[in-house]
Amino acid sequence: MPRRSPLPSELPARFSVSTAVALGVAPSRLNRGDLRRPFHGVRALGDTPEATLLASCLDYAPRLAEWQFFSHETALSLMGAPTPEWPHRPAVHVSAHRPAREPRTSGVTGHRLQLRESATLILPNGLPIEHPVRAWRQAGTLWGLDDLVAAADFLISDRGRRPIAAIEDLVAEVETLGDIRGGILRRALAESRGGVRSPRETRLRLLLVRAGLPEPEINWTLRTHRGAAVAELDLAYPRWRVAPEYDGRVHAEDAEQFAKDADRWDLIRALGWDHVRVLNHHMRGDGRSAVAKVRDALIRAGWRPGQGRHVPLSFA
């Protein structure tokens, strides 16, 4: 077997064929088995690619022209925003503003956007992405209503740091470029709320409100009669002392954390609250089981249908 010649040390783990050739690498060396060919014109060290969107974007990065950037659901995913659940798999979307050209190659969805001032961000890993506010509107061409609500909740919520965007930023983007698909973006904004920690929390809130239950408070701090904080409730009905909470754990794999949570649940109940744990199987299908659990708790607490009317925001 012929001995493989070493690659120049200047080459990174992922590189373009043109860059390698410019450094004196023979084209035949670029076809050896120790290099992957994730995209046309790109080579990468190793033979087993990671099955993640981030890995695909890093693989494609050597092909990016200076005017191109990751956009749509790709940009949102790279920012950590929730994307539609399985079986949906976010694709690699790359865009350019007119009159520049978008990419046209296998494995990538290219977009030529209307001419406007660039708002591209550079991530710490060096990937250029569309501004998340613009990417959220772009995702409106691909996603359903609830997925757009969950992504908007993510963008406007404080998760231990400054929110990525304000609701006003999303509204302004829709007003600037217009709504799409029968007004799906304005509908999503009307149902979006800040402070949400997870897409499943968003879905649970939407299920409850759409079923005619009152709209719950988000991240409501439960305190003793002396004002001491006991727990921060993901969703809460202070008037009826009912606290729905989504718990996505399949089992208590972290015994210490599970013990802390159990003690927290006891504290919530000790203050006269009905703590309603909603598990993954309650959310399956149309979520009817989750709604029934919360409705029953509210009725036990004295709520009657029609109380606590939900008034959606308007961005017309």
Image (tube, rainbow, N blue to C red):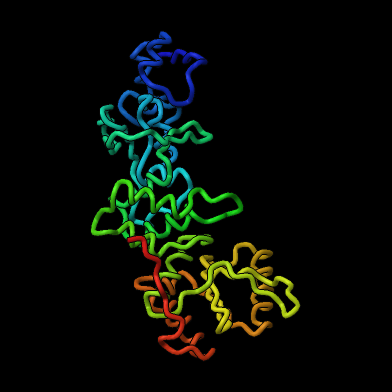
Give the vertical position of 134 relative to 305 (above or below).
Answer: above
User: In the rendering, at what x and y percent does residue 145 appear?
Assistant: 33, 61
The N terminus - image quarter: top left
User: In the rendering, at what x and y percent does residue 315 appear?
Assistant: 36, 60
Name the residue at 39% across, 53% down: 171
| Horizontal side, residue 173 vs residue 154: left or right | left
Q: Nearer the viewer, residue 98 or 123?
A: 98
Q: Where, by quadrant of the figure, is residue 234 drawn?
A: bottom right
| Horizontal side, residue 186 vs residue 52: left or right | left
Q: Is residue 205 visible?
A: yes
Name the residue at 37% across, 78% down: 211
User: In the rendering, at what x and y percent does residue 204 appear?
Assistant: 44, 70
Give the vertical position of 101 relative to 205 (above or below).
Answer: above
| Horizontal side, residue 75 vs residue 194: left or right | left
Q: Where, by quadrant of the figure, is residue 233 drawn?
A: bottom right
Give the vertical position of 198 relative to 214 (above or below).
Answer: above
Name the residue at 42% across, 35% down: 120
